[in-house]
Amino acid sequence: MTQQTLTITTPDDWHLHLRDGDALKAVVGDTVNQFRRAIVMPNLRPPVTTVAMAKKYREEILQAVAANGLSDRGFEPLMTLYLTDNTSAADIEAAAQSSFVHAVKLYPAGATTNSDSGVTDLLGRCQVALEAMQRHGVPLLIHGEVTDSHVDVFDREAVFIDRVMHPLRKAYPALKVVFEHITTKEGVDYVRDADGPTAATITPQHLLYNRNAMFTGGIRPHFYCLPILKREVHRQALVDAATSDSPRFFLGTDSAPHAKHLKEMACGCAGCYSALNALELYAMVFDEVGQLGRFEAFASHRGPDFYGLPRNKSTITLKREPFKVPEQIPFGESTLVPLAAGETLPWSLEHHA
Ligand code: NCD
Ligand code: ZN
């Protein structure tokens, strides 16, 4: 008989953009409904570069959770610092000693939304920070794309592996590395076989869609994110990795809210909003390949195991009941278009009363 329900340890989101101010208040409830913890990206303006800034941002997130009446869920934001050319060993030591900063994020300068303060030359400029991270066991989370405009946008991840991942691993063999939102077969192969403590997050959009989704019947800005969607062979490699028994691949939505009008314009922003329906989307992928049995490991076990955090004690339940994704949801004065807007998904999350 077809499986009708799936009860698993409450999942965590290991890659999330929550923004700040009114945007934060508008979106945080969606994540709290789906996840117990989330690794919160530091690409605000200005970026979150110090433990003091991370502390303030964490308080703002918890206030936004309270303003949504959701304090009783015990949601825990796991904070990150934004690596710059000037991050010091003292910054890393302070992070390691804090109870709430769990990682440092590398954005190559110019790679994506709010990355102008990013790193210009990781191996040349960030030795002190990387050395301290390796020593203190602080994970480096990597947006793995070269920013060289001569490199084709679809090849930027693969080129990054050759130019940065291999030399980085050689120079810092014990550094914990998460290759964020991998999108290619090359990314999967690299992470599966790399030496040292290496893992990767995978988003719902990269598991569900190939690059045709951006161009079906016209240009579709709500499928535009970075790294950009790739060919079908890459999507299949990602599905194989996520549903395999390797402990190195786990859930990270990269949910990245941008107001509808800022995506539907001549130069639209990169990012898909999936916090509303992430678990429904991921469950569909695992179900389609007959691997629902591996969903809990991907969503709830491998992430905390890699980060050295306890697994959650509570559970959530998904039901095989149609879930109609809204066309849009309120976002301050504007709206947000969620991933798979307007589609009916086969699984729905049983929400708390
Ligand atoms: C992210 C954002 O909007 O902050 N956008 C995206 O397309 N993923 C930035 C990022 O993670 O690259
Ligand atoms: Zn991201």
Image (tube, rainbow, N blue to C red):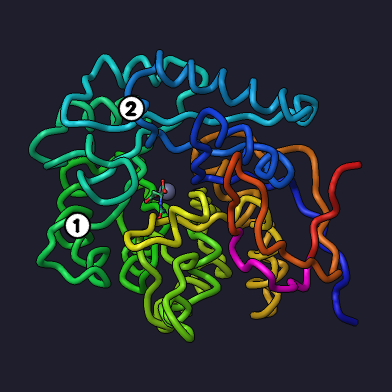
> Which residue is painted at 80% across and 49% down in the image?
316
> Which residue is painted at 85% across and 54% down in the image?
350
Q: Give coordinates of residue 69: x percent, y percent.
A: 78, 27
Q: What residue type is labelled 1?
A: Val
Question: Circle 1 — which element?
Answer: loop
**In the image, is the residue at mark 1 within 8 Å of ligand 1 by its beta carbon?**
no
Between discs 1 and 2, the one toward the N terminus: 2
How busy is the neighbourhood of tag 2: few (under 14 within 10 Å), some, or many (20 plus)? few
Q: Is residue 346 magenta?
A: yes
- 260 or 3, which lies in front? 260
* Highlighted range, magenta: 338-347
Outermost residue, bottom side: 217
Q: Give coordinates of residue 292: x percent, y percent.
A: 71, 69
- 112 or 236, which lies in front? 112
Say left or right for 269 vs 4: left
Say left or right for 75 vs 351: left
Q: What residue type is labelled 2?
A: Pro
- For mark 1, what is the residue? 146
